[in-house]
């Protein structure tokens, strides 16, 4: 006597497909948006404002990968501009003026962190004199 068992019925549910046509995209969109327009930090800009570094940044070689071929650069905002006119307009904007105000305070150092932790006496941060960079008119 042979017992014939019925075949199990197919159960509806999640497909076992592993990938799809969107697998090439990044999974974490929030991180992408946060880092998309990330600019230099204030302490990095303070290093760029040292006269030797500033001269190199303001007199760059032609670079076709950045806006304005790398010839119109705002030192304080770390941004490239298409031409001299837009650079001058940028100097009058609220964004540039806010950045100048932020740069007036001396950058945070390890010594200051140690003093804040109780390993020395508190010294208030110094104010740094910051002015908008000079623009050469003969670039046009």
Image (spheres, helix red, strand yellow):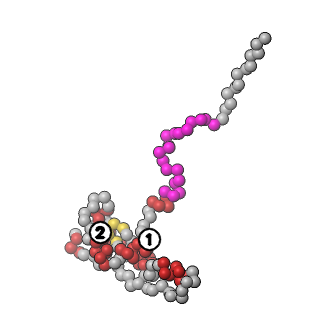
- Residue 95 visible in rendering: no
Q: Is residue 112 magenta?
A: no
Element under disc 1: loop
Q: Which residues are magenta?
A: 14-32
Taking the view exactly as shown, the residue that stands out farthest to the left is 138
Q: Is residue 20 magenta?
A: yes
Q: Are marks 1 and 2 in contact (CB under 8 Å)?
A: no
Relative horizontal placement of residue 63, taking residue 35 as reference (left or right): left
Asked if 51 appears above or below 63 in the picture, the reply is below
Residue designated by label 1: 41
Q: Magenta segment, principal secondary structure?
A: loop
Crowdedness of circle 2 by 10 Å Cα count: few (<14), some, many (20+)? many
Relative horizontal placement of residue 117, taking residue 12 as reference (left or right): left
Estimate the x, y position of residue 128 in percent, counting from the top left.
Answer: 41, 84
Estimate the x, y position of residue 57 in percent, counting from the top left.
Answer: 30, 71
Relative horizontal placement of residue 4, taking residue 52 as reference (left or right): right
Q: CA distance from mark 1 to mark 2?
A: 20 Å
Element under disc 2: loop
Taking the view exactly as shown, the residue that stands out farthest to the top is 1
Residue at 51 percent of width and 58 percent of height: 31
Residue at 29 percent of width and 65 percent of height: 70
Quadrant for residue 48, please give it: bottom left
Residue at 63 percent of width and 37 percent of height: 14
Residue at 57 percent of width and 83 percent of height: 118
Residue designated by label 2: 72
């Amino acid at each position: 006597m042979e017992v014939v068992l019925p075949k199990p019925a197919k159960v509806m549910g999640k497909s076992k497909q592993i990938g799809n046509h969107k697998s090439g995209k990044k999974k974490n969109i929030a991180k992408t948006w946060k880092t998309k327009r990330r600019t230099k930090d204030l302490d990095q800009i303070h290093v760029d404002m040292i006269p030797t570094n500033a001269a190199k940044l303001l007199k760059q070689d032609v670079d076709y990968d950045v806006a304005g071929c790398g010839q119109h650069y705002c030192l304080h905002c770390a941004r490239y501009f298409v031409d001299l006119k837009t650079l001058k307009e940028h100097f009058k904007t609220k964004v540039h003026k806010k950045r100048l105000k932020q740069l007036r305070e001396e950058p945070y150092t390890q010594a200051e962190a140690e003093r804040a932790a109780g390993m020395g006496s508190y010294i208030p941060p110094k104010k740094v004199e910051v002015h908008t960079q000079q623009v050469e008119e003969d670039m046009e």
